[in-house]
Image (tube, rainbow, N blue to C red):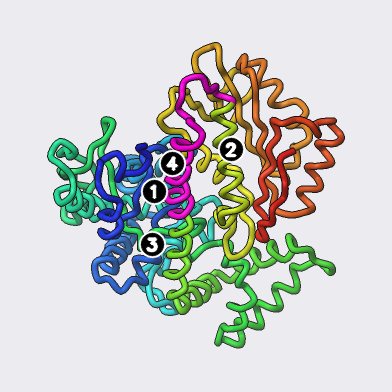
Amino acid sequence: MQIHFSDFFGIDPDDVENYGAFNISLINDLPLFIDPFLLFNSIKPEYKQLHVDIIRYITFLKDKADPGILDKGLLQNWYEFPEIKQNWLGFCLVGNGGAGLGPDFATALFNNLHEVFKDFGGETLTKGSHLEKLCLVKAGVGKDKISDFTTNLIKAFLLNYTQAFAKRFLKDDQRKIVALNKVRFNYQTESWESGRFELPFHNGDYVILTPKDILTKEDTWINRSDLFNNYDEVAQAIPNAQLRAQLNNYLRSVLPKKPKDKDVREARGKVITKFPEFVDYFISFKEKHGEQAVSVSEIRVKEIEDIFIKQLREFVKDLENTHKFYSIGIGTYEEALQRVLFLKDVIENKGGHKLFYTNGEPIRRESDLQILFRLTWFATSSDVSREVNDGRGPVDFKISRGNSDKSLVEFKLAKNTHLRRNMEKQVEIYEKASDAERSLKVILFFSKEELSKVQRIIKDLKLQNCIDIILIDASSTNKPSGSKA
């Protein structure tokens, strides 16, 4: 079955592994992205140079930016970039399309060149300059934008990296010379240049490979969440006694008498806004612990490989050899059910729950489960549609074979505040709108309390005997839950 890059091009997966590239899926994006800190902190000279090149470009933008004067033409040429979908990485839930870096990102970066990046290239508290500083100070510029920007700025390296692999391992008819825009920046003409590369070609488009050792999952090493979570440790380590006193005094002044966690976080945000130099101390703190970034990224990438590659391959064999999954006669409901039960088994019994955790804390996100589910659909005669809107709102997945056989699959978190209403009305409405025969409701929970909540709802709605509700236990203990309701 063709799921991953090596499958589609008929090569040994070990060749991809030994080359150092990630064996991407050509069915759907995988939740990995490039972390610029892994370039900065690398022992490889070529990676360090890539980070130097990134800093040089941002410094160029800063030097050219005239506060208050926004040239739309230059903004588009210098600041806006398309998403590089051909690397099949990121956060797209369907296929590999994405929004890229448009006017909003361009404007945010321009406006912050003389605020967030006012000392860019001349920092004294940190070992180097870091693009991630933008997401520390300004909410709304997340890891996806930082990664997309980084990917575009190292595009020439990735294309050459992929071209070298293609010429070495792929047949002539598996490669194609393609002309691409915005490959490298010419500082003499102050413009982006195009280039031609011989790349893997599949289904009407080229493919880009990415080295595993610059990838991570969940967040960049320098990130806004850690800025707040490590606040106390960073503040205590500041050598400037006067600044420490100012930070502590101001924090006390903005905290209510009986603060909750939300109050503390908001107060820390106010402190950071008033004393922006705190950000540089935080970055210095992350630099000093840089070796952990490498080990953390290795663990996270391995988790993705274990679930999205190894477990998925086992699932393929299981479907082929045991369930006769592709035999004539099986309907869309049975197809969907088998895939959901596979996910349940992987998450509950084979370590798949790790996908939903970072630093030991659960990341309650429906999208991770949806991506994993989408990757299980291959070699099927069914049409798998994502976020289909038939007039009454979108549904997660519609599985269909013409008009006579349709089934729906809806994924929800147990913690969802609208879960009761959803279970009572939503999917039934979707069924009528789509003329679907059956639907599956898949609910992911992380604790006994969440499980109890779902069980109460099921009992209240008299759905105890409903075989279409599947509960999946993603708790860290991962104890067998008998959780098919």
Q: Is the residue 393 above or below the residue 376 in the image? A: above
Disc assigned to residue 340: 2
Q: Nearer the viewer, mark 2 or mark 4?
A: 4
Q: Are marks 1 and 4 in contact (CB under 8 Å)?
A: no
Q: Work out whether mark 1 precedes mark 2 in sequence or the reverse, and give the earlier one.
A: 1
Q: Are marks 2 and 3 in contact (CB under 8 Å)?
A: no
Q: Work out whether mark 2 precedes mark 4 in sequence or the reverse, and give the earlier one.
A: 4
Disc assigned to residue 69: 1
Q: Are marks 2 and 4 in contact (CB under 8 Å)?
A: no
State the CA–CA distance, disc 1 to disc 2: 54 Å
Q: Nearer the viewer, mark 1 or mark 4?
A: 4
State the CA–CA distance, disc 2 to disc 4: 16 Å
Label 1 Cα neighbours within 10 Å, binned few <14 / some 14-19 / many ≥20: few
Query: Residue 150 colored magenta?
Result: no
Q: Work out whether mark 2 precedes mark 3 in sequence or the reverse, and give the earlier one.
A: 3
State the CA–CA distance, disc 3 to disc 4: 37 Å
**For this view, does 365 lie left or right of residue 51?**
right
In this figure, which residue is indicated by the disc labeled 3?
36
Can you name the residue that lies furthest to the right here?
460
Q: Which residues are magenta?
A: 304-333
State the CA–CA distance, disc 1 to disc 4: 60 Å
In this figure, which residue is indicated by the disc labeled 4?
317
Give the residue type at disc 2: Val
Give the residue type at disc 3: Pro
Label 3 Cα neighbours within 10 Å, binned few <14 / some 14-19 / many ≥20: many
Give the residue type at disc 1: Ile
Q: Magenta: predominant secondary structure element?
A: helix
Q: Work out whether mark 3 precedes mark 4 in sequence or the reverse, and give the earlier one.
A: 3
Please tell me whether mark 2 sits on a helix, a strand or a loop: helix
